[in-house]
Image (tube, rainbow, N blue to C red):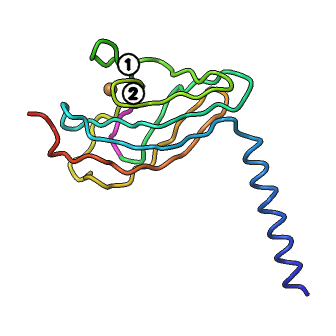
């Protein structure tokens, strides 16, 4: 009896937690992936889809990864050249994609020990939604680097 009650309480607590989590955030992050830069040996890029379910625009304003010494920048690409931007808008009720040849999170200073398949944790900082933590695996090999 006590056991059953405990289970019910646990399920209730989990439900409240999950509902709370959903209500708290309008930002959904999907399909996170990362590659080594094909040109810069210690650099990489992170891609993902970001959906804003809310009725207000939000902005990705910063990010960080769980590897010491790695610096991140928000980048966009125009006419084949990438450049740093201050923030990435995620308009209300829509989604955007960070992808090859477009918006991306740039990583600088990736240590040599980081290899294809390694898992990296990235914290995304949104102006309204706050921090979101997601994981991805590096998809490309350092051998792909163009010399
Ligand atoms: Cu870049």
Farthest front residue in view = 94
Secondary structure of the residue carrying tag 1 is strand
Would you identify the image quadrant in which residue 128 lies?
Answer: top right
What's the residue at 77%, 42% (across, down)? 23
Q: Where residue 98 sits in the image (x, y, percent)?
A: 44, 30
Please report whichever mark, 2 or 1, sits nearer to the chain's N-terminal start.
Answer: 2
- Find ligand 1 in the image and state its quadrant: top left
Q: Which residue is mark 2?
A: 73
Vertical arrangement, residue 44 with respect to residue 115, above or below: above
What's the distance in space between the residues labelled 2 and 1, CA to CA? Answer: 6 Å
Which residue is at the front of the view, 79 or 6? 79
Q: Which residue is mark 1?
A: 84
Give residue 120's mark: none
What's the residue at 42%, 49% (across, down)? 136
Q: Is residue 38 magenta?
A: no
Magenta span: helix, strand or loop, mainly?
A: loop
Quadrant of the image containing the C terminus: top left
Q: Where residue 81 sits in the image (x, y, percent)?
A: 27, 16
The answer to whether the residue bearing label 2 lies less than 8 angstroms from the nearest atom of ligand 1 is yes
- Neighbor class of circle 1 (other Cα within 10 Å; few <14, some 14-19, many 20+) is some
Farthest left residue in view = 147
The answer to whether the residue bearing label 1 lies less than 8 angstroms from the nearest atom of ligand 1 is yes
Are the residues flagged by discs 2 and 1 in contact, CB closer than 8 Å?
Answer: yes
Would you identify the image quadrant in which residue 22 lies?
Answer: top right
Vertical arrangement, residue 24 with respect to residue 94, above or below: below
- Neighbor class of circle 2 (other Cα within 10 Å; few <14, some 14-19, many 20+) is many
Residue 23 in the figure: left or right of residue 127: right
Boundaries of the magenta span: 68-72
Farthest bottom residue in view = 1
């Amino acid at each position: 009896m006590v056991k059953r009650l405990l289970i019910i309480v646990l399920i209730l607590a989990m439900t409240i937690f999950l509902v709370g989590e959903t209500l708290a955030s309008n930002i959904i992050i999907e399909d996170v992936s990362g590659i080594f830069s094909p040109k810069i040996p210690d650099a990489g890029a992170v891609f993902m889809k970001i959906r804003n379910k809310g009725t207000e625009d939000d902005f990705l304003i910063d990010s960080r990864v769980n590897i010491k010494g790695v610096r991140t920048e928000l980048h966009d690409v125009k006419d084949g050249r990438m450049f740093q931007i201050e923030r990435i808008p995620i308009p209300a009720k829509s989604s955007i994609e960070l992808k090859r040849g477009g918006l991306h999170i740039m990583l600088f200073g990736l240590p040599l020990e980081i290899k294809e398949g390694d898992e990296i944790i990235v914290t995304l900082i949104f102006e309204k939604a706050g921090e979101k933590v997601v994981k991805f695996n590096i998809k490309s090999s350092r051998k792909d680097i163009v010399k």
